[in-house]
Image: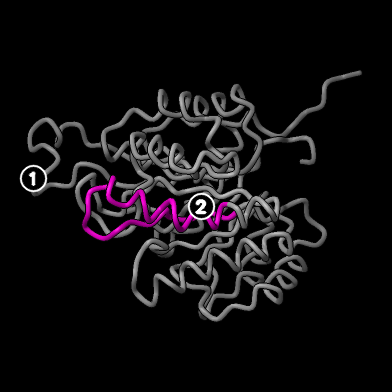
Amino acid sequence: MSQEKIRIGTIVNAGGKNNPAHYIRQILPHGFESFQIMFWQTLGGANLEELAQQVNEALVGSDAVISSLGIFGNPLGSRDIDQQTREGWEKCIEAAHLFNCNMVVGFAGRVVDKPIPESMGRYAEVFGALGKRAANKGVRIAFENCDMGGDWQRGDWNIAHNPTAWEMMFNAIPSENIGLEWEPCHQMVSLIDPMPQLRKWLPKIFHVHGKDATVLWDVVREYGVHGPKEFAFHRTPGFGDSNWTDIISELRRGGYEGSIDIEGWHDPVYRDELEMTGQVHALNYLKRCRGGSFVPNPQ
């Protein structure tokens, strides 16, 4: 594993009543190689120093790593909970080294219900400071590409879901340590072909979420995307439309070194009692798409 440059892992929920170390111990034997520790909106009272110690102890004896810390909220907002999200970003940046990782991920945030260009000033203000804090700690920032139900004109979570917005963001803060947490799913449900986008934006992709989608093209053709019928839904890798052999090949061609962490809890079929069945299937599927286990060349 030490010579494999792309790891396959999963997301572990943290904060509140969640016990990440206990969860990792339970699923580690399935063969997960990395874990993203994820918080929703706030740290939920978590002591990151204690959590790091517990998680690191759970990993002892394995080759698995913590790929990143995630804090998913609206850091550009003006509510108390948005302030807690910003504080969560700061604390995760400061604590990343305790988890032996160098990446913090999440939504870029948004000025609520305003067109994306009207968020750029606030984005530059918030992430200009957070980006410098991260750079001083040797930490990279990666933005999830999920629209969270928003579009160009309106939304309340995230501006980093469209390539035009990415161009504006990276022009506003031209920093080498600010990039993307990409997955094909969010592009496919917007009817974007993920492969040309992956090739173009790969230098800015710091982390990959393992999540796929199924697009019901017959529904699109008959009812469009604004009708009463669902035309696309999220899938666990191995059950959706993406060719992950092609995706991982492009990642390798572009020199990507990092993790593909499976984002579960979205598949409409492999959920509830089938959740871990689906995730382990995705784990083994992605390993096969990666080419299997690393095999050193003969000397």
Q: Residue at x 12, y 30 (%)?
A: 221
Instruction: Write the start and end of the magenta stretch as one range.
Output: 104-131
Q: Where does residue 47 sit, x and y in percent of width and height?
A: 64, 78
Q: Is residue 209 visible?
A: yes
Query: What residue is pinned by disc 1?
Result: 227
Query: Quick check: 251 left or right of 221?
Result: right
Q: Nearer the viewer, residue 277 or 223?
A: 223
Q: Where does residue 281 sit, x and y in percent of width and height?
A: 52, 46
SS under mark 2: helix
Q: Residue at x 23, y 44 (%)?
A: 152
- Residue 130 is covered by the magenta coloring: yes
Q: Which dot marks residue 128?
A: 2
Q: Residues within 10 Å of mark 2 (few under 14, many from 20)?
A: some
Q: How many marks?
A: 2
Q: Where does residue 65 sit, x and y in percent of width and height?
A: 71, 53
- Give the amino acid at mark 2: Gly
Q: Residues within 10 Å of mark 1 (few under 14, many from 20)?
A: few
